Image (cartoon, rainbow, N blue to C red):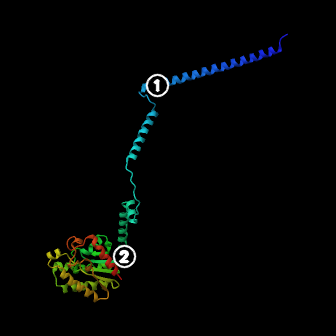
Amino acid sequence: MSDPKKKKHNKKAGKKAMIEREQNKAKQKQAKEKQKQSEQEQAVEEQVTEEQAKSGMFLPVFLIFDAVALIVIALILLGTFSKKETVQEPYFLTYEQAVAEAAPDFQKQIEDLTKKWKKEARQERFNNSVFLGDSLTEGLGIYGYVKTKNVVAQKGININAAAKKVKKIVKQNPKYVFVMLGINDMSYEGSYLPSIEERYRNIIKKIHRNLPEAQIYVESLLPVTSAYENSHKKLTNERINKFNKRLKKLSDDYKYTTYVDIHSLYVNKKGCLPSKISSDGYHLKPEAYEKWLDYVKNKMS
């Protein structure tokens, strides 16, 4: 008869042996898989090494890029820290300075626009006016101070020739007529001043007969430079001053005429036209016309 205790012991021993065998098999399988994986990794490394050797590259590309990037960063940092650190003190700008710094051309653009608007406003102000005269008056239209249609002028014209242009003035039916004549009569003819004044009176009367509602402005003659009068004995500042006095008296004789003293705007302490504002001792430079127009504008009723 068998012993029950011994039988139970043998059964436990057999079960334990079976578990150990299963564990050994699992370990062997895991070892084989690990070895297989190791062999595959080794094969891949050998293949990569072989391809790099063929292409002449012994370092992975990403390592080269990393190395270059590190060098660039190092150089930048070196340059940054090697500079002497300076502290800029804060300062305040005026409006003009801020505009100039923000946009160098902006200030010039504003100035140009302002000049343009002022020019257009001036032209509009004299849109119902006509300027009658010689080459000096002609410059008002040439340089754009007034529209050319508002200028009836001709180089070298005398009073008798100007009288023939009254019809042209009448067609425009202006409200204001500005007259500057007599300088060429004095220069080319050397006429007796009372005779020039009489012709002047005649053209003023002719304008009034044809334009009875128009206000006529008698503009004084301008001075000449000292160099100019030295070379033009018939046209001196002394004679110009004498004729201007006659023009002043002429204007006072009629209710429809007003004397405008342009002469005083351009005479220096020596009683002459400053050479810096004249191109030839008699004619004005373009920029010199501005105060002429500003002055007569204020005289307009």
In the picture shown, does residue 27 fall above or below 154? Answer: above
* Numbered circle sitting on residue 125: 2
Residue at image location 14% in from the left, 76% down from the top? 230
In the picture shown, does residue 186 fall above or below 50? Answer: below
In what element is the residue under mark 2? Answer: helix
In the picture shown, does residue 44 fall above or below 112? Answer: above
- 65 vs 116, nearest the viewer: 65
- 245 vs 34, nearest the viewer: 34
Tell me where residue 294 appears, x and y as whole percent.
Answer: 32, 76
Left or right of residue 138, residue 123 in this image: right
Identify the residue under disc 1. 49
Tell me where residue 264 appears, x and y as whole percent.
Answer: 26, 80
Left or right of residue 232, residue 251 in this image: right
- 282 vs 148, nearest the viewer: 282
* Numbered circle sitting on residue 79: none
Under mark 1, the amino acid is Thr
